[in-house]
Image (cartoon, grey):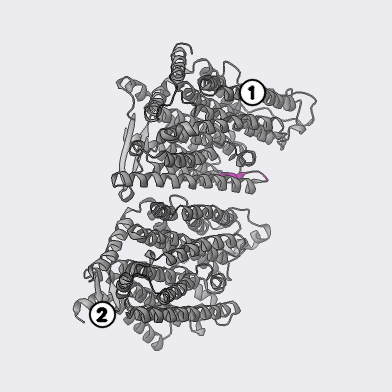
């Protein structure tokens, strides 16, 4: 390893070092605020190393990791999202936890999960893939059950644990089969061997499908979505946000790399599998979301549907697809952060506010908070001026460009269905304030006038991202195009 | 000049937050801000239109004013605005109807006044954007932008069934919009296939030659997108509920302006972009128009709810627009233009009156009214006037519109036109029936109610004056839009594979020339 390798790896090394620092800081002295700031700064400093790493990218560091524009872009996304989540967590944990219960490890686990996410974005080898996957999954598992005195989080944690184990089992077996047939462990070499075969061996294909099932489990694509609503509902809200954004973005970054380097989208069975997953996810997610009375569950089902849309974009294949997927994932992270962020902030004022009724007439009592949720919902529904519209436009464009008419039609039909439940929540925000709640509202209004500045800053940041991307997406599009060309170039360059 | 186009859009949008904040200063401040912003817009549009008639001699075809800035070069999307006679007329109508809507809600809206007027301005800003945008992506952007404020207007200030109505409104229009979006994207990508770079620009896409199969599908998608808004059957079911449940101001905006965006889309985009498929699709579209005229007229006769009656009459009138738009003669297109303006005015008046009645008697059921002529003479006279306008009394603007449409399309589809004329007879039946049930006969409700306020009465008199003026002197509108319509027809005739029977085109050109001297 030479100096340039270290520079290229600096984000990962940096975050790893900060994990240690945070751990030592906790061991030295427990202090919630200090550790939260430490975690926040860890992400910030890691974020600052990205431009430095970009000077030597693209670069393959050992056979395990590749640091290129694609990885760096997703790293930026993951780290920014983590920062927002850390900022939102502090008050939430304060309201749900007693100081002496030990909340500090929460931040350490969060950083470890993010570390796993960073590894996933750079993974170019089965081993690094699996390591990142497990690091992310195990950290998340303990984070979900972090409120260990309550029933729901524990139930959710057990469910997530079972899911993680199942996904890992599928993944490991699949990887073993891939190795058995192609004799290689790096994505690239596997891709080369695929090109040499006249017909793809059945065993190899089976292995690939097992791997994809493992990924689909993590992404929560239907019919592997059973865990999503329960875990989303049971987990502490900041962690729900984390699962919805960072965890999914990291896995998506990996899937994109796998898809381009191995060229799996040129195999008809995989295309059929993905089309099926896309349609089933869209339909299941949207139809079941119609029935939900709990905001977190509603957003959970909607996330299933959104990853169905992402798959439509992915299936288009080629550079436009990678571009559309990346754009959509970034946009999706921003709007999920917005929606779940509001739930987090609102719940930080005592008790989980996750029923739809809790939001009745919120606009009249808390205009800014409700406005933020309304903006996120409009974005999720894909209405212009918000980023969600450009994202949906991108997905449709990629689909039409590749001639996937049926999938595009399914996407449109589902968008219309999804409007119904987004609007329902949206309308609730503008409904009349119920009388019996209006009276105690007097007290809460006074208390809620103090909205913590962290919440204001983080939600303001997310809102500005949603609006800026909705009105002027060109700079991000250029950035994504560079990173995508980077991704494809690496594939082309290597012998 | 280019800046003025942006001002047209930005004035209402920027005034919107001010109107919201204005609530703190006084109860009426938001209303005055809306009136001020729209008046400035109106004068600005008038000024731009004045430039138009001055520069008209120099030759038509180019935009009178244009503004072009790159926006998302990756997809060939630009901030491209253009103004011609068609847009001028519609923007004037928008600003005017917006003012009427504000006056109509002067006493009705008492809660959250600031937010209401904020939404009104945002919606109108979106509509003006729709009338100006000539980049298809930008057009769609504005097309969607006007939806959310309208939705909020209905859902917050609407009547008892507002939730149901607003959902229906939103889902229908959004479904139509998404179909439209796919077609727009497909067009841009076809442009990419043909020239190597995607483009959403109107001029670029006009030059695109499509296979007839592709053109047919895309035209159908455009048609669905716009017919939902217009609306024409079978996409009209959202309309009666929405019009009835929305607050009066919002109903006036919906009926007076938003319906016109659908018609505008037909004229501006659907006709010129797909001349290849025009011959195939035109009979279907015209058929839908006729069905709309008759079906809605029959249903209007059966209504007991006064707002629903006006709503159905609105669908019926929109049928004429659809009919004329696809007739393929300049005369019919001019009729469409006239009908858009006339219907905008008459329907604004009628909904204002219906709203006033509802405010006084807390019901829209005509069965509970009757004999109100003596109680509210001003209201009654004005309703009689607008009922006559709506049924197409000669001398008023609606008559000119409907007459020109029927006259202009007779050559292409005689049978359909004969059927459509029945619509005018039906209009007399339901309009006069409405008068009969509300103002004549035995008085059901003996409560005394105040008559129209001076402001409302004055506004209605002013609209009535406009109706008479345009009815007697339609050239005011027709000359402004004439170059646009001529160009439309030429484009359609040149690009379409000229299957037109020579005698037929002779006939239509004959009508055009005879028309030139008469009105």
* Tally of numbered discs: 2
Question: B233 or B501: which is nearer to us?
Answer: B501
From the top left corner, tell me how far across and down residue B70 is, in percent. 30, 45
Image location of residue B372, percent across then percent down? 74, 26
Residue B455 lies within the magenta run:
no
> In the structure shown, which secondary structural element does the residue marked by tag 1 occupy?
helix
The numbered dot on residue B422 is: 1
Q: Please give left or right for residue B473 compared with residue A117 in the image.
A: right
Q: For the residues marked 1 and 2, what is the alpha-carbon distance in whole angstroms?
A: 82 Å
Q: Quadrant of residue B481?
A: top left
A452 or B2, nearer to the observer: B2
Q: Nearer the viewer, residue A255 or A173?
A: A173
Tell me residue B499's x, y (percent).
Answer: 43, 26
Query: Which chain's residue wears label 1?
Result: B
Q: Which residue is mark 2?
A: A62
The answer to which of B298 and A126 lies nearer the viewer is A126
Neighbour class for label 2 at 10 Å: few (<14), some, many (≥20)? few
Q: Which residues are magenta?
A: B153-160
Residue depicted at 61% across the width and 18% down the height: B393
Q: Secondary structure at mark 2?
A: loop
**Quarter of the N terminus of chain A within the rendering:** bottom left
The percent coordinates of residue B82 (x first, y second) are: 36, 34
């Amino acid at each position: 390893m030479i100096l340039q390798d270290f520079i290229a790896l600096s984000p990962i090394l940096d975050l790893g070092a900060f994990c240690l620092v945070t751990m030592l800081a906790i061991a030295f002295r427990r202090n919630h605020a200090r550790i939260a700031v430490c975690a926040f700064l860890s992400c910030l400093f890691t974020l600052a190393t990205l431009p430095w790493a970009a000077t030597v990218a693209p670069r393959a560091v050992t056979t395990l990791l590749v640091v290129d524009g694609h990885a760096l872009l997703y790293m930026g996304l993951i780290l920014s999202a983590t920062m927002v989540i850390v900022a939102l967590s502090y008050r939430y944990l304060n309201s749900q936890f007693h100081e002496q219960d030990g909340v500090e490890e929460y931040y350490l686990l969060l950083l470890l999960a993010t570390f796993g996410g960073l590894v996933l974005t750079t993974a170019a080898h089965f081993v690094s893939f699996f390591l990142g996957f497990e690091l992310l999954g195990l950290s998340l598992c303990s984070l979900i059950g972090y409120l260990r005195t309550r029933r729901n989080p524990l139930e959710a944690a057990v469910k997530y644990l079972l899911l993680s184990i199942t996904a890992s089992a599928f993944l490991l077996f699949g990887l073993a089969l891939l190795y058995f047939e192609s004799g290689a462990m790096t994505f690239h070499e596997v891709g080369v061997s695929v090109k040499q075969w006249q017909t793809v061996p059945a065993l190899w294909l089976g292995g690939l499908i097992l791997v994809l099932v493992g990924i689909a489990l993590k992404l929560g694509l239907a019919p592997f979505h059973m865990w999503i609503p329960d875990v989303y509902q049971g987990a502490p809200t900041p962690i729900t946000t984390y699962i919805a954004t960072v965890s999914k973005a990291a896995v998506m970054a990996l899937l994109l790399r796998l898809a381009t380097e191995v060229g799996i989208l040129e195999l008809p069975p995989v295309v059929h599998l993905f089309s099926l997953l896309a349609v089933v996810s869209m339909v299941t997610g949207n139809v079941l979301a119609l029935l939900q009375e709990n905001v977190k569950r509603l957003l959970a089902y909607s996330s299933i549907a959104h990853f169905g849309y992402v798959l439509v974009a992915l299936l288009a294949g080629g550079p436009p697809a990678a571009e559309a997927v990346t754009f959509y994932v970034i946009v999706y992270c921003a709007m999920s952060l917005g929606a779940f962020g509001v739930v987090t902030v609102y719940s930080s004022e005592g008790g989980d506010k996750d029923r739809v009724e809790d939001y009745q007439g919120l606009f009249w009592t808390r205009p800014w908070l409700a406005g933020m949720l309304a903006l996120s919902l409009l974005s999720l529904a894909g209405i212009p001026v918000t980023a969600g519209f450009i994202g949906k436009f991108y997905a449709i464009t990629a689909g039409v460009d590749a001639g996937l008419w049926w999938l595009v039609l399914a996407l449109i039909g589902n968008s219309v269905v999804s409007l119904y439940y987004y609007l329902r929540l949206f309308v609730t925000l503008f409904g009349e304030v119920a009388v019996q709640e209006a009276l105690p509202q007097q007290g809460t209004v006074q208390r809620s006038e103090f909205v913590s500045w962290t919440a204001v800053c983080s939600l303001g940041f997310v809102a500005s991202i949603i609006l800026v991307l909705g009105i002027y997406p060109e700079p991000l599009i250029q950035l994504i195009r560079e990173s995508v060309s980077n991704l494809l170039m690496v594939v082309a360059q290597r012998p | 000049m280019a800046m003025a186009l942006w001002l047209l859009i930005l004035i209402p949008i920027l005034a919107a937050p001010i109107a919201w904040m204005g609530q703190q200063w006084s109860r009426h401040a938001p209303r005055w801000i809306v009136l001020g912003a729209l008046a400035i817009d109106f004068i600005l549009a008038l000024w731009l239109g004045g430039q138009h008639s001055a520069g008209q001699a120099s030759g038509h075809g180019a935009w009178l004013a244009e503004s072009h800035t790159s926006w998302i070069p990756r997809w060939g999307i630009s901030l491209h605005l253009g103004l011609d006679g068609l847009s001028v007329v519609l923007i004037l109508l928008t600003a005017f109807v917006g003012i009427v809507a504000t006056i109509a809600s002067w006493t009705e809206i008492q809660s959250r006044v600031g937010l209401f007027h904020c939404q009104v301005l945002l919606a109108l800003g979106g509509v003006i954007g729709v009338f100006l945008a000539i980049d298809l992506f930008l057009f769609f952007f504005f097309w969607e932008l006007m939806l959310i404020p309208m939705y909020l207007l209905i859902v917050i200030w609407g009547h008892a069934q507002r939730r149901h109505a607003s959902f229906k409104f939103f889902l229908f229009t959004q479904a139509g919009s998404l179909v439209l979006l796919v077609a727009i994207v497909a067009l841009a990508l076809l442009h990419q296939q043909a020239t190597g770079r995607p483009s959403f620009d109107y001029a670029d896409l006009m030059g695109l030659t499509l296979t007839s199969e592709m053109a047919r599908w895309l035209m159908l998608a455009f048609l669905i997108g716009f017919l939902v808004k217009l609306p024409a059957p079978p996409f009209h079911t959202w309309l009666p509920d929405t019009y009835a449940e929305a607050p009066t101001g919002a109903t006036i905006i919906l009926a007076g302006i938003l319906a016109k965006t659908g018609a505008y889309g037909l004229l501006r985009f659907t006709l010129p972009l797909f001349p290849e498929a025009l011959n195939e699709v035109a009979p279907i579209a015209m058929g839908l128009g006729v069905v709309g005229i008759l079906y809605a007229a029959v249903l209007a006769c059966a209504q007991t709810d006064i707002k629903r009656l006006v709503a159905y009459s609105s669908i019926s009138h929109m049928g004429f627009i659809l009919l004329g738009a696809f007739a393929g003669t300049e005369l019919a297109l001019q009729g469409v233009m006239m009908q858009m303006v006339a219907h905008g005015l008459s329907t604004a008046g009628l909904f204002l009156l219906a709203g006033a009645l509802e405010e006084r008697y807390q019901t829209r059921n005509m069965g509970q009214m009757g004999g109100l002529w003596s109680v509210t003479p001003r209201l009654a006279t004005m309703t009689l006037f607008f009922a006559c306008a709506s049924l197409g009394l000669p001398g008023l603007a609606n008559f000119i519109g409907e007459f020109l449409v029927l006259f202009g399309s007779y050559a292409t589809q005689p049978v359909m036109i004969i059927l459509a004329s029945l619509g005018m007879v039906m209009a007399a039946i339901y309009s006069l029936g409405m008068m009969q049930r509300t103002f004549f006969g035995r008085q059901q409700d003996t409560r005394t109610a105040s008559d129209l306020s001076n402001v409302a009465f004055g506004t209605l008199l002013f609209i009535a004056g406009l109706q008479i003026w345009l009815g007697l002197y339609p050239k005011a509108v027709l000359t402004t839009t004439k170059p646009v319509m001529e160009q439309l027809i030429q484009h359609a005739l040149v690009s379409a594979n000229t299957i037109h029977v020579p005698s037929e085109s002779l006939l239509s050109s004959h009508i055009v020339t005879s028309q030139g001297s008469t009105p």
